[in-house]
Amino acid sequence: MDLSSLSPQNLPKWTWNDFEEYYRDLVGSRGQDVEEFLAQWTTLSEAVDESFSRLYVATTVNTSDEEARARYHAFLEEVFPRAEEQEQALKKKLLEFGAVPAGFQLPFERIKQEIELFRQENLPLFVEERKLESEYDRIIGSQTVMWEGEERTVSQLRPLFQNRDRTTREQAWHAALNRQLEDRDAINELWVKFLELRLKIAKNADAQDYRSFRWQQLMRFDYTPEDCKRFHDVIEKVVVPCAARLCKRRKEILGLTTLRPWDMDVDPIGRPPLKPFSDAAELTWRCARIFESIDHQLGAYFQVMIQQGLLDLENRKNKAPGGYCTDFAASKKPFIFMNAVGVHDDVQTLLHEAGHAFHTFEREVLPYYHQRHTPMEFAEVASMSMELLAGNFLESDKGGFYSHEDAARAFNEHLEKGILFWPYMAVVDAFQHWVYEHPEDALRPENCDRQWALLQRRFMNWTDWSGLDEELATGWQRKLHIHTVPFYYVEYGLAQLGAVQVWEQFEKNPVNAVQRYRHALSLGGVASLPVLYETAGARFTFAEPALAAAVARMESRMQGDWQNAG
């Protein structure tokens, strides 16, 4: 099997006929040792993976591109199921060797679990699921409003949520929500299809329920659903009171009787919104300087991305929502996608996704494809740590975006949002547990609305939603993870706890902390979650003392900004 002349840019044009001969040769091969087999399997897996990634990226950078959508669907329908069948054969072939190379034990355990989960009848269902995910992106990506005579995406209204004029904030917020509510029925219909499909997938796999199936699929070896629920309780006990204090202080300084949803992003003491950059080019080069300041090698990685066109940062119409970093496995390069509109959150998003990108660069030292699949609970430590490590470099004099005062303000705002994030994470994760514990109820979207509202009031009761029942209850429709990557959200809460610990080590000894961080990233998926966290200078834990210490550290660092305003 010779893929040495492979051109990664041509991979999106490949059909199953192009891949088939390589699979046939590898499945039928004899006389290899396990290292040679894994090396050849790696090359083939990289090719299939990159073909998929490039096709998926094309559908997200322009959700109205019907040709890209057709190519992506053709891959899902023609290549994906056949490749999965052959992958199953290769996994079984690996077992026949009776031994695995050093550093392959954990990937080997994951492969054995994948063999156990595989069901032929689920392959077309996975294809359908991918198509539904693409349809969700299309719906969200097409949402625009007219504002002051100009068509804007819903995301482009975000800067107005920081406007000092409360009437402007409220009008912009309502404009965004009203447009999103226009698609309520369409998303409800899509939701029922998602849920019915996932229940069928779990049944086919002989799983107790979809959550059990998904736990196995996500290779969650180190914690259970019950651990997640205990984490929710700890967040309610430790973080919610702190978040409530911050919001109470915000309300007092703003001189309001209640905090409304459009009061959460404005600066409480009346400073104008931060304006970190004018366009995506400026966002790029300023972040490049920050990465260089943190570590020369990280800066060099980011320069590769700039030079090779691996960034798509600005928001525009018909662009899928959110942000992500994917990797082009054969090229051994990452790609960052996001929706920048000129606010500080965009800076944090690029810092976050760059952390994922650095992870891709670092773990490429591992020789085999299956060694590079890092548990997401640690992959998010890579990204969320970068958000915090950059905090000391936000000043323009240090390579960043702001004056000394605005840099301190920006980092304080990030820490505030970090504290407020844990309760929101608990809402999203608890909602998903409810869905898949009560699937018959969740098939009725009005029940989902009711449950989401209950969880919002449990974990985030500082915001006054009176008269906004519909807007409150449909919040689950606007959280893409619930629809497109079920049960992928608790990772952020766990990772933020780990990231705060990495940040603490960085403040004590920056050089050593970055070395540990990069070493942990280079381990990819060859170590367990506890070992990955420990290597990075943190602990993998759900425990109350660790979360309380992290919250106290973040809150104490915030002192001196608007919290102490008169």
Image (cartoon, helix red, strand yellow):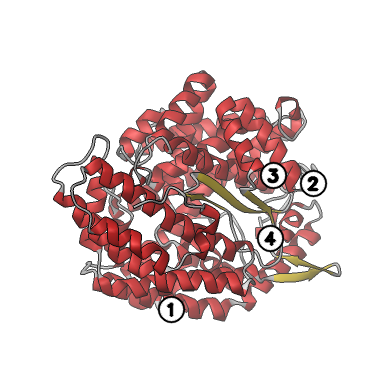
Q: Are marks 2 and 3 in contact (CB under 8 Å)?
A: no
Q: Which mark is residue 344?
A: 3
Type of amino acid under label 2:
Ser
Q: Check disc 4 and report its element: helix, strand or loop.
A: helix
Q: Could you give the CA–CA distance between mark 2 and mark 3, rounded to whole angstroms?
A: 12 Å
Please tell me which of labels 4 and 1 falls first in the chain.
4
Q: Check disc 2 and report its element: helix, strand or loop.
A: loop
Q: In the rendered picture of this protein, how many numbered marks are placed on residues?
A: 4
- 212 left or right, relative to 162: left
Please tell me which of labels 2 and 3 falls first in the chain.
2
Type of amino acid under label 1:
Val
Q: Return the x and y of residue 486 as percentages of the image width and height.
A: 41, 62
Q: Check disc 1 and report its element: helix, strand or loop.
A: helix
Q: Which mark is residue 278?
A: 2
Residue found 58% across the figure and 63% down from its top? 58
Name the residue beneath numbered marker 1: 192
Instruction: Decide if residue 326 is in sight here.
Output: yes
Q: Return the x and y of residue 449 as percentages of the image width and height.
A: 49, 72
Q: Return the x and y of residue 228 as percentages of the image width and height.
A: 34, 51
Name the residue beneath numbered marker 4: 155
Q: Could you give the CA–CA distance between mark 4 and mark 3, rounded to whole angstroms?
A: 14 Å
Q: Are marks 4 and 3 in contact (CB under 8 Å)?
A: no
Q: Return the x and y of residue 13 as percentages of the image width and height.
A: 52, 65
Q: Nearer the viewer, mark 2 or mark 1?
A: 2
